[in-house]
Image (cartoon, helix red, strand yellow):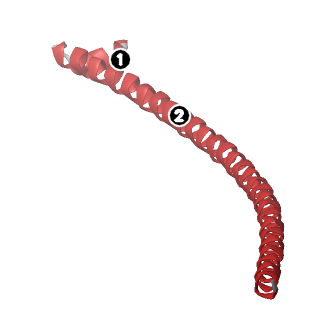
Amino acid sequence: MTELSQSLQALSERARSATEHIQRLRSKSETVNRNLADSEKELVEQLNTLISAIETKKQELTERLRDERTKRIHCLKEQINRVTSLLTKSTGLIQFCIEMLKESDPSAFLLVN
């Protein structure tokens, strides 16, 4: 019976060791879950901060582009007005010269107009 008793005692010791090992594994599992949950929370917070910063930068850059577009369009409209004015004056001068060339006495035409 001694041999059987020793075998049972050894088996009992192994069972106790296995139980302790299972408890350590469960504890580690809980620690891993807790750590991963904390890491996930931190990651989400950092990503939300990054997304917010990107959105803010997007708004700033979009606003700058719109302002620049408005300035350029304003400059182009001013140029169009200046060139149109010069073209109108040039066209008038060309018409005046054409009429002057049609006259037999150009100096008399200048006096009348």
Q: Within the image, what quadrant is residue 100 found in?
A: top left
10, 29: nearer the viewer: 10
Which amino acid, by three-letter code, is at mark 2? Ile
Q: Please tell me which residue is depicted at 35% across the width and 12% down the height of the picture.
A: 112
Residue 43, placed above or below residue 58:
below
Amino acid found under the numbered disc labelled 1: Leu
Which residue is painted at 80% across and 65% down in the image?
Answer: 26
Q: Mark on residue 73?
A: 2
- Classify 101 as above or below 39: above
Q: Are marks 2 and 1 in contact (CB under 8 Å)?
A: no
- Viewer-proximal residue among 96 and 12: 12
Question: Residue tagged by mark 1?
Answer: 111
Percent across and percent down for residue 4 are: 77, 81
Residue 82 pos. (x, y %)? 47, 32
Residue plotted at (53% across, 38% down)? 75
| Mark 1 Cα-neighbour bin, 10 Å: few <14, some 14–19, many ≥20 | few
User: Is 93 above or below relative to 10?
Assistant: above
Q: CA distance from mark 2 to mark 1?
A: 44 Å
Q: Disc number at residue 79?
A: none
Q: Secondary structure at mark 1?
A: helix
Image position, residue 58 (x, y; %): 65, 46
Q: In the visual, does 108 lie left or right of 52?
A: left
Apparent side of residue 66 relative to residue 20 in the rendered image (left or right): left
Q: Nearer the viewer, residue 11 or 58?
A: 11
**How many callouts does the rendering have?**
2
Secondary structure under tag 2 reads: helix
The residue lying toward the viewer, choosing from 47 and 106, is 47
